């Protein structure tokens, strides 16, 4: 919570195997859909790597964005074949 943003910051842990754990809810697994829903609901989230403590919030947000983009054509289409089209 900050004076500028009264919403509490909720910290999740990302395990070595890529799972998300909600430490404030007894270590409950948080799936990608729940993570997306929490972001859409306006929850302030921060994701930390379990062993290094590194912030990996943007990694997960970018994965959500990439999953919403078309798999063929556009930038992702170029990335899929090394840009040889």
Image (cartoon, rainbow, N blue to C red):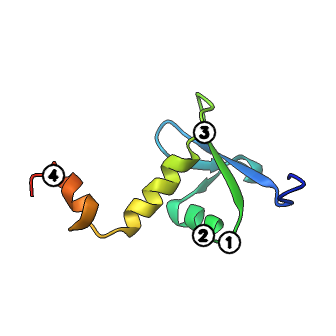
Q: How far apart are marks 3 and 2 (CA)?
A: 20 Å
Residue under label 1, please give it. 41
Residue 77: percent from left, percent from top:
21, 61
Label 3 sits on a secondary structure element that is loop
Between 75 and 15, the one lying in front of the other is 75
* 1 and 2 marks in contact (CB < 8 Å): yes
* Left or right: residue 48 compared with residue 78: right
Label 4 sits on a secondary structure element that is loop
Q: How crowded is mark 1: few (under 14 residues within 10 Å), some or many (20 or more)?
A: few
Residue 3: percent from left, percent from top:
90, 54
Residue 5: percent from left, percent from top:
83, 59
Q: Which of marks 3 and 4 is nearer the N terminus?
A: 3
Q: How far apart are marks 3 and 4 (CA)?
A: 30 Å
Which of pointers 3 and 2 indicates the residue nearer the eye? 3
Give the residue displayed 70% in from the left and 68% down from the top.
42
Q: Which of marks 3 and 2 is nearer the N terminus?
A: 2
Between 3 and 60, the one lying in front of the other is 3
Residue 37: assigned label: 2
Q: Earlier in the sequence, mark 4 or mark 1?
A: 1
Residue 83: assigned label: 4
Which of pointers 4 and 2 indicates the residue nearer the eye? 4
Q: Distance between the residues labelled 4 and 1?
A: 37 Å
Give the residue displayed 65% in from the left and 66% down from the top.
38
Q: How far apart are marks 4 and 2 (CA)?
A: 33 Å
- Asked whether the viewer can see residue 19, the reply is no
Q: How far apart are marks 1 and 3 (CA)?
A: 21 Å
């Amino acid at each position: 919570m900050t004076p500028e943003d009264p919403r509490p910051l909720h910290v999740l842990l990302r395990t070595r195997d890529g799972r998300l754990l909600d430490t404030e809810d007894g270590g409950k697994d948080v799936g990608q859909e729940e993570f997306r829903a929490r972001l859409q609901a306006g929850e302030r989230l921060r994701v930390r790597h379990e062993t290094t403590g590194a912030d990996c919030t943007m990694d997960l947000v970018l994965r959500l964005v990439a999953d919403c983009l078309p798999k063929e054509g556009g930038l992702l289409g170029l990335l899929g074949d090394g840009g040889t089209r």
